[in-house]
Amino acid sequence: MMQQQQQQQQQQHPTDINQWQNMMMMLVYNVCSIGSTPIEMALRPLYGSRYVPPFIQFLSAIMMMLAPVLNGLFQMIPFIGGRPGPGLFDIGTFTNLFFLGSFIHGFRVWRRMVHPESEKFSWFEGPPLPIFRIIPGTFWMIRIIYEPVFVFVTAIVLENFFILQSSAAHFLMVSAMMLAMKQYVAWYMQWQFLRELLDARNAGPIIAKIVDNSATEDELATIHLASIPKDIPDDLRKETASFIARAFTGKDTVSGENQ
């Protein structure tokens, strides 16, 4: 019984590592979504009905309500805080704009939910602003580079022209960095999905050669395996191939073919 449990733990190990990595990436994605949602509502006003989940909307609303309070408390700290710098708009103005935008977007998303035929893809983040169509670049270049840089530079310019107070400008800068990280994680997860399919396809012939005892050391090195002894039993060799197949595909393809 103990041996079977140890074997199951060893067999699940590659999948568990991938699940842990995916869980951490989703954590980063969701945390960055909370901070970037206020500016995404303005950057992409036609996002899909499921692009911003309810829990992200809720946490973003909590963040925007706490931001003016925390900013006021920070200004009360002796020798660190101080009077707000010159500027027409502060972080409180952004809070008001956020809830106004949430109401407008809420009505728009509600109409799409009532009439689902009005949108093709509910997860789509929406087309970029027309200004980004002028600049040459791919879809992900706009999402990862152009939009965050635009928000970051806009915050600096508006602060220098005394339109934004430092609290509002710093909020935009942090949100821009979160937006860049969020979109990078989204790109990486899609790339990883396609890359895993390609790796599984390329590893298939090598796994088949392991079963046939004809894999060379160079072929084994491409999938990070040491040389396998030529005189091991066939059942152990097939079990090794099954373990490798699970590491690449998450499925016991070899044993499934043998059954």
Image (cartoon, rainbow, N blue to C red):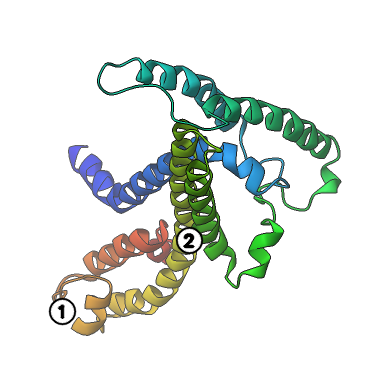
Cβ atoms under marks 2 and 1 closer than 8 Å:
no
Compared with 38, 146 (above or below) is: below
Report the amino acid beneath label 1: Lys
From mark 2 to mark 1, how far is it between C-alphas? 34 Å
| Residue 111 position within the rendered picture, expressed as x and y whole percent measured from the top left | 83, 36
Q: Look at the image and tell me in which quarter the C terminus lies.
A: bottom left
> In the rendering, at what x and y percent does residue 204 appear?
40, 74
In screen coordinates, is 224 left or right of 110? Answer: left
Q: Residue at x 79, y 31 (%)?
A: 107
Provide the residue designation for mark 1.
230
Q: How many marks?
A: 2
What SS does tag 1 mark?
Answer: loop
Give the percent coordinates (x, y) of residue 210. 28, 76
Residue 81 in the image: above or below residue 166? above
Q: x, y (%) of residue 233?
A: 19, 70
Residue 216 showing in the rendered view: no
**Front in this rendered view, residue 42 or 6:** 42
Question: Is 229 located above or below residue 26 in the figure?
Answer: below
In the rendered structure, the answer to whether residue 44 lies left or right of residue 25 reads: right
Q: Residue placed at 24% from the left, 49% from the top?
A: 10
Quarter occupied by residue 240: bottom left
Q: Amino acid at mark 2?
A: Phe
Q: Is residue 233 above or below residue 20?
A: below
Q: Residue at left 67%, top 51%? A: 124
Q: What residue sits right under mark 2 in the picture?
A: 193
Secondary element type, mark 2:
helix
